[in-house]
Image (spheres, rainbow, N blue to C red):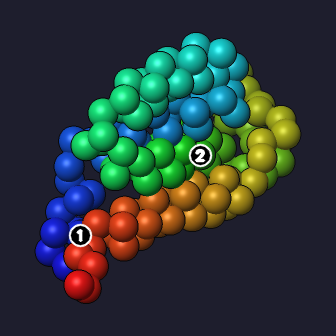
């Protein structure tokens, strides 16, 4: 079981997580840049047989931008106004951060659990 848990600390797992971050930012406008970069990195990692076993890191990476969206909208849902010394500023139509956080956490937990179970030793 120790080998399975240490599989999460392998560089390949985190490189795959970087691919997932690129794919995860596809929900935003910068996805036009991050998705092709993630696809190139994925192609490189797939060409290395030793890196293929850590591919579940993609799920962890996808969860990170979703948690970022949840954090940015942490005062939502709805409209939120802030008063400053020189006026006020309102943000309208903020999405529910709980939904984004739940989906982001689900991706992260799924990626970690899948990697742990995939890396555990098989009985002979």
Farthest residue in the top direction? 33
Horizontally, is 94 left or right of 24 in the view? right
Horizontally, is 16 left or right of 39 in the view? left
Residue that numbered label 1 is attached to? 4
Q: Earlier in the sequence, mark 1 or mark 2?
A: 1
- The residues tagged by marks 1 and 2 sit, at their Cα atoms, a distance apart of 26 Å
Q: Residue at x 27, y 79 (%)?
A: 122
Q: Nearer the viewer, mark 1 or mark 2?
A: 1
Residue 38 against residue 51 in the figure, above or below:
above
Q: Are marks 1 and 2 in contact (CB under 8 Å)?
A: no
Task: In the rendered structure, find residue 66 and report the number of the disc placed on it.
Answer: 2
Q: Residue at x 69, y 20 (%)?
A: 29
Residue 78 at what x, y percent from top left?
A: 83, 48
In what quadrant of the picture does the N terminus appear? bottom left
Residue 102 against residue 42 in the figure, above or below:
below
Q: Residue at x 34, y 50 (%)?
A: 54
Residue 39 at what x, y percent from top left?
A: 53, 24
Task: In the rendered structure, find residue 96 and report the number of the disc placed on it.
Answer: none
Q: Nearer the viewer, residue 59 or 123?
A: 123
Badge 1 element = helix
Q: Residue at x 36, y 45 (%)?
A: 52
């Amino acid at each position: 079981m120790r080998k399975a848990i240490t599989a999460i600390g392998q560089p390949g797992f985190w490189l795959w997580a970087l691919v997932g971050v690129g794919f995860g930012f596809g929900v935003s406008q910068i996805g036009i840049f991050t998705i092709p970069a993630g696809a190139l990195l994925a192609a490189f990692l797939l060409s290395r047989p030793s890196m293929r076993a850590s591919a579940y890191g993609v799920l962890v990476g996808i969860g990170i931008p979703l948690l970022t969206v949840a954090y940015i909208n942490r005062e939502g849902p709805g409209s939120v106004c802030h008063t400053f010394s020189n006026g006020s500023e309102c943000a309208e139509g903020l999405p529910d951060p709980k939904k984004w956080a739940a989906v982001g956490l689900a991706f992260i937990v799924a990626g970690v659990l899948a990697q742990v179970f995939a890396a555990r030793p098989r009985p002979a």
